[in-house]
Amino acid sequence: MSEHDHEDHEHDHDHDHHAHEPELTEDARAEAEAEARRRLALAQIRQYGDPSLRLVANEIVDFDDDLKRLAERMTGLMHDAQGVGLAATQVGVLRRLFVFEPDEDGPKAIVNPVLTLVGDETEEDSEGCLSLQGVRVPVERPTRVVLEGKDLDAADVRYDLEGYGARIVQHELDHLNGVLILDRTDDEHRKEALGELRPRISLR
Ligand SMILES: [Zn+2]
């Protein structure tokens, strides 16, 4: 290596160092803040072992400000926890409401949701859950569903969903019936997942 090359290298290195370090620090700080927000949100979401995750939620009759506040709070928690869906039972509220966000169209809330159409085709994919931290299991689900219910103002809503969106709403609807991905996977993965969850429970 010639002296010149060496100097060039040093120079590049130096330049890189000064130009990129503040940016990296900023990124690192943003990442640390996001991680702190995620942990705070997860601390407010009921975790496996909590009985409310196993109960069937009740139909919603009153479309009042309370309901809007609940949906708003759930949407905030879903975002902070970096999830794509959150059901009321996961915050200990036994009401038939969930929020979801399958794409960049923004978050949606649905009240008293029902599947009015379920396609014949199914697909297996790996699913996680904000109430089962550290667990991912394969779950087979229909790839197309039509979901109907009410929005927060009691107006009828209908979503024709395929793929990822269809999977999310089926997962959230399960929550309103006390069903978890552990119930939807095979014995082997269930056993493995329970092994992952058990130590955490005994520490409580
Ligand atoms: Zn879940």
Image (cartoon, helix red, strand yellow):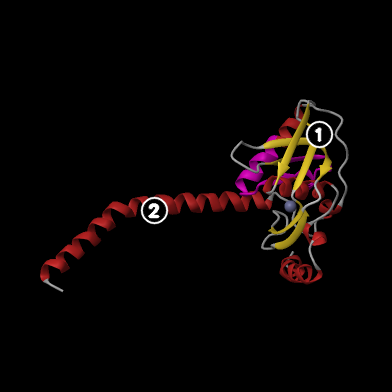
Q: For the point 81% across and 59% down, which residue is it?
A: 184
Q: For the point 73% across and 49% down, which residue is it?
A: 167
For label 1, the crowd category at 10 Å Cα-Cα, with few meaning under 14, some 14 to 19 and many 20 or more, is some
Counting every numbered tag in the picture gives: 2
Residue 85 screen position, x and y as percent: 69, 46
Q: For the point 60% across and 51% down, which residue is it?
A: 38
Residue 194 screen position, x and y as percent: 77, 68
Front residue (pair 130, 174) = 174
Residue 62 screen position, x and y as percent: 84, 28
Circle 1 sits in a helix, a strand or a loop, which is it?
A: strand
For label 2, the crowd category at 10 Å Cα-Cα, with few meaning under 14, some 14 to 19 and many 20 or more, is few
Seen in the picture, residue 1 relative to 95 is either above or below; the reply is below
Magenta segment: 72-98
Residue 196 screen position, x and y as percent: 71, 69
Amino acid under disc 1: Gly
Residue 94 highlighted magenta (yes or no)? yes
Amino acid under disc 2: Thr
* The residue at label 2 has a CB less than 8 Å from ligand 1: no
Q: Distance between the residues labelled 2 and 1?
A: 45 Å
Circle 2 sits in a helix, a strand or a loop, which is it?
A: helix
Please name the residue that numbered disc 2 is placed on.
25
Q: For the point 73% across and 55% down, which residue is it?
A: 131
Q: Residue 24 carries which label?
A: none
* The C terminus - image quarter: bottom right
Seen in the picture, residue 37 relative to 128 is either above or below; the reply is above
- Which residue is the extreme one toward the left? 3
Res 10 quadrant in image: bottom left
Residue 89 highlighted magenta (yes or no)? yes
**Which is more N-terminal, label 1 or label 2?**
2
Res 59 quadrant in image: top right
